[in-house]
Image: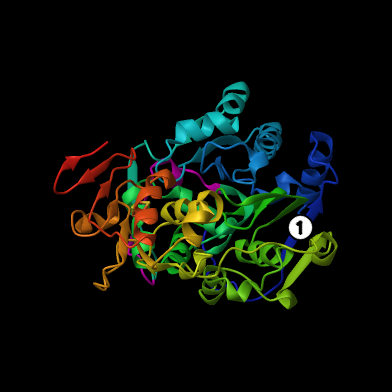
């Protein structure tokens, strides 16, 4: 792993921005080569004493890269080929998102086939032996738990996706590092503490030595999963300073990086540059690749509901519960039940959500198991959106009987037992 330069205040950070005018392999390869070329090529990027390089792509779910959710495996292939040309040892590693076996994500994104074809080890961070690393000067975390191969590698290339994110607003290179956390329960700690500060502590502990953000097909709207929408943009960005890379990408997405908390906190922690005066943008200018518009996610959990009749009680849910609820409220809910509502419904979500006793509440997700039998409750982690249907529809009609809907959508009535 690269040393952390906590005093990364002086000098200028270079960020290379390149464009592929079509998402075909020829154009992408040329854009990739121009990106590395801005740093003198892979041999100049990687110091001569490096023994083993770890590539960490965003493969959070079993969705192909064209959805805007995961990275284009061709970028990983190009990197591996460059490293092999220089006879540098390389491995690929990732831990998929909550509830998704990494194997499923690896297969669906094409990384399993790619690594086997190129004879490169592929490590599932959620299944290997782990080690604890202390967080230097952690503001929230004292340690992180990662696969033991991580500290054995002496150079990390982070390949992130350019995405909007319901919880952290943007998911770029700093956020992509979360896939290093080996255990789901450790990832959950991020959400229960403060995800933005935890991301900074994580990046203090493991610094990517080079970061690439793939925005060939980016994601806009309610990300990081569906109903976020693919946004063909044709952009790659990369550099050695992850804060500078994310700051440039945020601007391409039409956002002020200082308003994206984990980027601002990372800058305040000395992990990189945020101001354009301290960043040299090589290749394409930000303005030349910035789209006319970019659909942002709601800026708070409470704002996830587009309906006055449904209020969200924020208990710091993790992004999986957020994505599941957002996908239901924005994509699948039957608008008729809203039109016919006779009362409002409050949805408690996330472990810290507390019932106000209003009598109009529904609790969702295993984090709120304590409300089973007390409030209408939907189990699951995350609860699938089809499990919400019944209880929200009943609630909007004023029926708040404390039924439980299990994650397989079976209803349990506390008085009469399982009903279907
Ligand atoms: S119940 Fe929801 S918020 Fe809680 S851990 Fe599961 S997915 Fe995350």
> Could you tell me residue 341's position as x and y percent?
43, 63
Residue 195 pos. (x, y %): 43, 64
Q: Nearer the viewer, residue 317 or 19?
A: 317
In this orientation, does residue 5 appear? yes
Question: Which residue lies most toward the top here?
Answer: 117
| Span shown in magenta | 139-155
- Point out the image quarter for the C terminus: top left
Residue under numbered circle 1: 16
Residue 382 visible from this viewpoint: no
Is 151 colored magenta in this rendering? Answer: yes
The residue lying at 51 percent from left, 55 percent from top is 336
Q: Is residue 327 above or below residue 85?
A: below
> Which residue of the protein is positioned furthest toward the left in this rendering?
415
* Quarter holding residue 264: bottom right
Residue for point 29% across, 43% down: 406
Vertical placement of 325 versus 311: above or below? above
- Is residue 345 found left or right of 161 in the rendered image? left
SS at mark 1?
A: strand
Residue drawn at x 71%, y 45% is 42
Relative placement, left or right, of 378 versus 25 is left
Most foreground residue, 218 or 292: 292
Q: Position of residue 254 (x, y in %)?
A: 71, 68
**Left-right relation of 284 to 404:** right
Q: Nearer the viewer, residue 354 or 163?
A: 354
- Mark count: 1
Residue under the image location 66 percent in, 74 percent down: 256
Label 1 lies in ligand 1 vicinity (Cβ under 8 Å): no
Observer-nearest residue: 95 or 154? 95
């Amino acid at each position: 792993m690269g040393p952390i330069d906590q005093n990364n205040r002086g000098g200028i950070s270079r960020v290379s921005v390149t464009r592929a005018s079509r998402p075909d392999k020829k154009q992408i390869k040329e854009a990739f080569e121009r990106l590395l070329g801005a740093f003198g090529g892979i041999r100049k990027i990687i110091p001569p004493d490096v023994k083993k390089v770890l590539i960490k792509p965003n493969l959070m779910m079993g969705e192909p890269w064209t959805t805007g959710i995961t990275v284009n495996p061709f970028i990983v292939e190009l990197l591996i080929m460059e490293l092999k040309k220089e006879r540098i040892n390389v491995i690929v590693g990732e831990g998929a998102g909550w509830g998704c076996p990494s194997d499923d994500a690896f297969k669906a994104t094409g990384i399993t086939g790619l690594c086997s074809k190129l004879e490169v080890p592929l490590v599932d961070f959620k299944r290997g032996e782990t080690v604890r690393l202390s967080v230097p000067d952690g503001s929230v975390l004292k340690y992180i738990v990662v696969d033991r191969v991580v500290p054995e590698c002496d150079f990390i290339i982070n390949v992130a996706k350019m995405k909007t994110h319901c919880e952290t607003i943007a998911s770029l290179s700093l956020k992509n590092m979360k896939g290093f956390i080996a255990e789901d329960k450790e990832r959950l700690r991020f959400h229960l503490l403060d995800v933005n500060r935890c991301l900074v502590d994580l990046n203090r502990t493991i610094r990517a030595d080079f970061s690439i953000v793939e925005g060939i097909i980016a994601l806009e709207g309610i990300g990081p999963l569906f109903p976020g929408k693919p946004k063909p943009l044709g952009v790659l960005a990369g550099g050695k300073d992850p804060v500078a890379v994310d700051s440039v990408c945020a601007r391409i997405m039409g956002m002020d990086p200082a308003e994206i908390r984990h980027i601002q906190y990372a800058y305040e922690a000395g992990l990189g540059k945020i101001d354009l005066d301290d960043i040299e943008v090589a290749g394409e200018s930000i303005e030349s690749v910035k789209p006319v518009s970019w659909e942002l996610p709601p800026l708070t959990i409470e704002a996830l509901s587009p309906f006055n009749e449904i209020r969200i009680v924020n208990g710091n849910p993790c992004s999986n519960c957020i994505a599941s609820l957002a996908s239901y409220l924005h994509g699948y809910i039957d608008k008729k039940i809203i039109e016919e509502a006779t009362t409002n419904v409050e949805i408690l979500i996330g472990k810290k959500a507390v019932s106000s006793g209003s009598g109009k509440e529904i609790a969702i997700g295993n984090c709120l198991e304590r409300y089973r039998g007390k409030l209408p409750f939907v189990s699951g982690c995350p609860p699938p959106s089809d499990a919400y249907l019944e209880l929200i529809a009943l609630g909007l009609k004023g029926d708040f009987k404390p039924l439980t809907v299990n994650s397989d959508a079976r209803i349990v009535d506390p008085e009469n037992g399982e009903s279907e």
